[in-house]
Image (tube, rainbow, N blue to C red):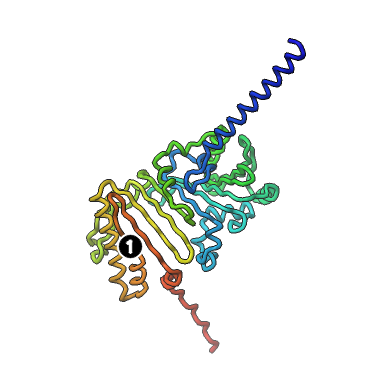
Amino acid sequence: MNRNRLVLFVSVLVVVLGVVAGLGALWLDSARAAVGPLPGEGLVLPADTQFVMGVDVKRLVSSPMWERWASNKAMRPDAMDQLERWTGLDPARDIDQIVVAGRGGTGKKQPTPLVMAMGRFNLEKLGWSLDKVERGTTSQLEGATLFTMEQKGVSSSLAILDTSTLLFGPTAKVQDVVKSRSRGETPLRQNEQLLALVEGVKPGSTFWVVGDQTLLANMPKGVPAPGMGGPGGASMNLPPLQSLTLTGDLDPQLSLALTGVAADEASATKLADVLRGLVALMSLQAQQKPELQELASAFSISTEATRVLVNARIPYELLEALQPTKKAAPAEETAQ
């Protein structure tokens, strides 16, 4: 092959490789396109996921709820506390969005979910913080840095996927996600039922949760009948749900919208009646705690074909009034 032909061959090869690379990038971008409020990166989560939860952290930390109860334990789950201890990150400052994905369990055996955090991360500072954690080990896996910690026989890992994405959870699950990501796979797309629920989430929600039928199979099958509870009291059977969607906003008050899909219209009507009974029970107990009457009136329950719709608008002042009253500290005995 003469020089001119060689130059032409190399030029054509470079162009072909560039086109292939470009098409590959376009394919990955489209394969990981966002689904409703779920960012595209979340599609690398496992296919057998039974529930997905999302939190818009920026909306959360700018809400009246955060201003009132930022120090409350319920506002900082254990997984986020551990992530903060390991990395030195301040979720309120460094994280934009959180996605939690997992499976349900029975009793006390609740599997640890995967937590994906998206924001703007200083990798050098992050690595420095992880190096200071005792008994932790750092390794590389298919382009991602893994920090692993063994505690009480349980192995947890934090994967640094890139400058904007962290993944935290059980080591084996984290490793599987990292491997899927490196191969350009999107396992969660296989779970069409769950993604259909995610796609239907109301845009702009501060937080949202969806669960499929496999998760809801572990729900209690009955609840005490209003006015007939207590040991040996009657109970009402709950019809099974096919799916559950919860969305919420925090400004100017706590606003919740829950949609449960039953197997048929009769089941939806029965479930709505059960929920109305529970709300009525709160009203009956208002004599002991008047705030319960106001809470009961904050809920509205209706049905549309097989769907049960529950909406609530709860002022923060009411939530504060419902908090348990702290017992006064015992007075110190005076010296005799």
Query: How far across and down, in percent of the image, does residue 77 sit?
Result: 51, 56
Q: Residue at x 48, y 66 (%)?
A: 252
Quick one: which residue is furthest to the top in this view?
1
Disc 1 residue type? Ser
Task: Please name the residue shown 44% across and 58% down the image.
Answer: 248
Query: Does residue 303 sit above or below 229 in this rendering?
Result: above
Q: Quadrant of residue 70?
A: bottom right
Looking at the rendered structure, the secondary structure element under dot 1 is strand
The residue at which mark 1 appears reads as: 300
Nearer to the camera, 75 or 120? 120
Quarter of the figure that contains the N terminus: top right
User: Viewed as shown, does residue 154 lie left or right of 194?
Assistant: right
Residue found at the very far bottom of the displayed protein:
336
Q: Nearer the viewer, residue 20 or 256?
A: 20
Label 1: how many Cα within 10 Å (few below 14, some 14–19, many 20+): some
Which residue shows up at 44% across the image and 74% down it?
A: 325
In the rendered image, residue 174, in percent from the top left (x then y), is placed at: 54, 41
Residue 318 is drawn in which quadrant?
bottom left
Give the total number of marks visible in the rendering.
1
Name the residue located 64 percent from the left edge and 55 percent from the top edge. 88
Q: Give the vertical position of 161 relative to 334 (above or below).
A: above
Task: Tell me: 166 left or right of 48.
Answer: right
Give residue 15's position: percent from left, percent from top: 66, 24
